[in-house]
Image (cartoon, helix red, strand yellow):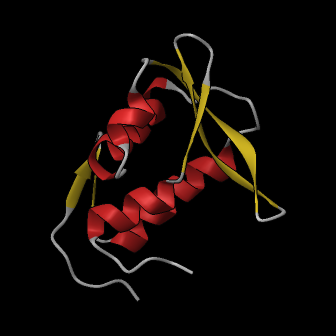
Amino acid sequence: MAEESAPVSIGYKTFANDDECRAYFRHILTSYRRHQDLNDYEKHNVIDLIEKGHPQAERKMSGGVKAIQVREKRVDGRSSKCFHLIRDNGDLEDVSYVKCVENLFGVAKSS
């Protein structure tokens, strides 16, 4: 269960807790087809999530972000969906929204 914390504003939205935030970004992840660019509204929210919550945000965001897509990444032999930043030069950078949410809300690492 989520711990009580102050509401957090990310992009155009405000989340009361980590569960609400995680559900919103999970919904985006599952709503888009692979390799489909997020719309400008969702892109803005994901970029703000990364900037505020990712421990390596500066590195992740370096080189500009032309688009964000949902793609798959292999981790420990499993395929997992995650956001991929498409940099201005075409390079890809994967990002875990879960890591961002956990960092923002100060929740214990998920297993």
Observer-nearest of 87 and 6: 87
Q: Please tell me in which quadrant of the rendered image residue 108 appears.
A: bottom left
Above or below 63: residue 70: below
Q: Which residue lies most toward the bottom here? A: 1
Q: Does residue 43 appear left or right of residue 2 in this picture?
A: right
Image x and y of residue 15, in percent: 29, 61
Tally the numbered discs: 0
Above or below 40: residue 2: below
Image x and y of residue 75, in percent: 74, 59
Observer-nearest of 96 and 45: 96
Q: Which residue lies at the image location 74% right of the left edge and 30% below the top edge? A: 35
Instruction: Say whether residue 16 is visible.
Output: no
Instruction: Say whether residue 109 is visible.
Output: yes
Q: Please tell me in which quadrant of the rendered image residue 103 appears.
A: bottom left
Q: Does residue 17 appear left or right of residue 44 in this picture?
A: left
Q: Which residue lies at the image location 37% right of the left edge and 45% below the top edge? A: 56
Q: Which residue lies most toward the top here? A: 89
Q: Does residue 3 appear left or right of residue 39 in this picture?
A: left
Q: Which residue lies at the image location 27% right of the left edge and 47% below the top edge? A: 52
Above or below 5: residue 45: above
Quadrant where the C terminus sits is bottom right
Quadrant where the N terminus sits is bottom left
Image x and y of residue 60, in percent: 44, 35
Q: Which residue lies at the image location 74% right of the left edge and 48% below the top edge? A: 73
Image x and y of residue 7, in percent: 19, 65
Q: Which residue lies most toward the right here? A: 77
